[in-house]
Amino acid sequence: MKKIVYSLLLVSGLLIASCNDGTSSKGNTVITGNVEGLNQGKLYLYQMQDTTLVAVDSLIVNGGNANFKFALDIESPEMLYLTLDRGHTVSQDNQLGFFAEPGQINIETNLKKFYAQAKVTGSTNQPIYEEYLKVRGSVIDKQNGLIVEMFNARKENNQHALDSLVNLDKRLNNRKYLNSINFAINHKNSDVAPFIALTDLYDANIKYLDTIYNSLDSNIANQKYGKQLKEFIAERKEMTTVQE
């Protein structure tokens, strides 16, 4: 089955560089911004093409001028990724995923907290996606807290406590799925809805994916992620039929 699933982490084996070194100046989507505190490094703009993340443009920052501008053509709103190559500085905070759409998008961020303190404006989908990340993040934070507690329970050989923590983790995982499903259905007029289905619910029961797709506004269903969700559901159903 052809996978139409997006990872929010850039995997080196899936990256293809086809950069224009900041020379791209034409397109229906213009992305501008600044990275405060960046004196030297390289910025990349990545786009998912088929199932591969491709660097469609890049810009070298040298001498402290960290203003950037990228331009490209996109048919409908989609997730793009602004990535920072810090050179010799090692950091996990180097990638910013954001919802772009035709028009002017601006990104203001800084070197110390490239992702955490980024402010994206000009996109109607971005604030919806950020709201979703907060909802999802609250559950993930609780699950992360359980990891330490489960480690301590194993260390103390406390099977009763461990069983309770494992059950709690399962309930939180179910809540995370239900939160994602409900959020997608409640935001059926946003491209964020099918994107959530493709990224965080791809392994969910097919009936939930069907429910999300069937709830989409017609214009969303006919845009990039709506079309991909429809195709993905059809492939899931076909695989299920073959296995039976």
Image (cartoon, helix red, strand yellow):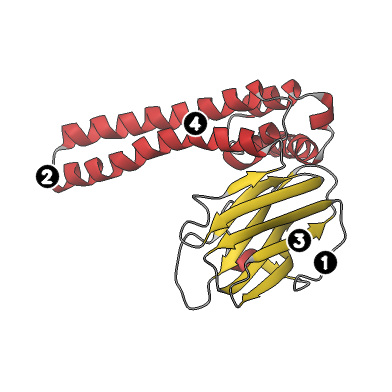
Decide which of tag 3 and tag 4 comes sooner along the chain.
3
Callout 3: few (<14), some (14-19), or many (20+) C-alpha neighbours within 10 Å?
many
Residue that mark 1 sits on = 24
Residues under numbered marks 1 and 3 in contact, where contact means CB atoms less than 8 Å apart: yes
- The residue positioned 82% from the left and 57% from the top of the image is 72
The amino acid on which the numbered mark 2 sits, given as a three-letter code, is: Glu
Q: Secondary structure at mark 4?
A: helix
Where residue 146 appears, x then y in whole percent? 29, 39
Q: How far apart are labels 1 and 2 at the CA level? A: 59 Å
Q: Which mark is residue 218?
A: none
Decide which of tag 2 and tag 4 comes sooner along the chain.
4
Closer to the camera in the image, 187 or 35? 35
Residues under numbered marks 3 and 4 in contact, where contact means CB atoms less than 8 Å apart: no
Q: Nearer the viewer, mark 1 or mark 2?
A: 1
Q: How far apart are labels 2 and 3 at the CA level? A: 54 Å
Decide which of tag 1 and tag 3 comes sooner along the chain.
1
Which quarter shows the C terminus? top right
Residue 126 against residue 24 in the figure, above or below = above
The amino acid on which the numbered mark 4 sits, given as a three-letter code, is: Val
Where residue 13 appears, x then y in whole percent? 61, 68
Q: Nearer the viewer, mark 1 or mark 4?
A: 1
Q: Quadrant of residue 221?
A: top right
Residue that mark 4 sits on = 135
Q: Quadrant of residue 182?
A: top right
Decide which of tag 2 and tag 3 comes sooner along the chain.
3
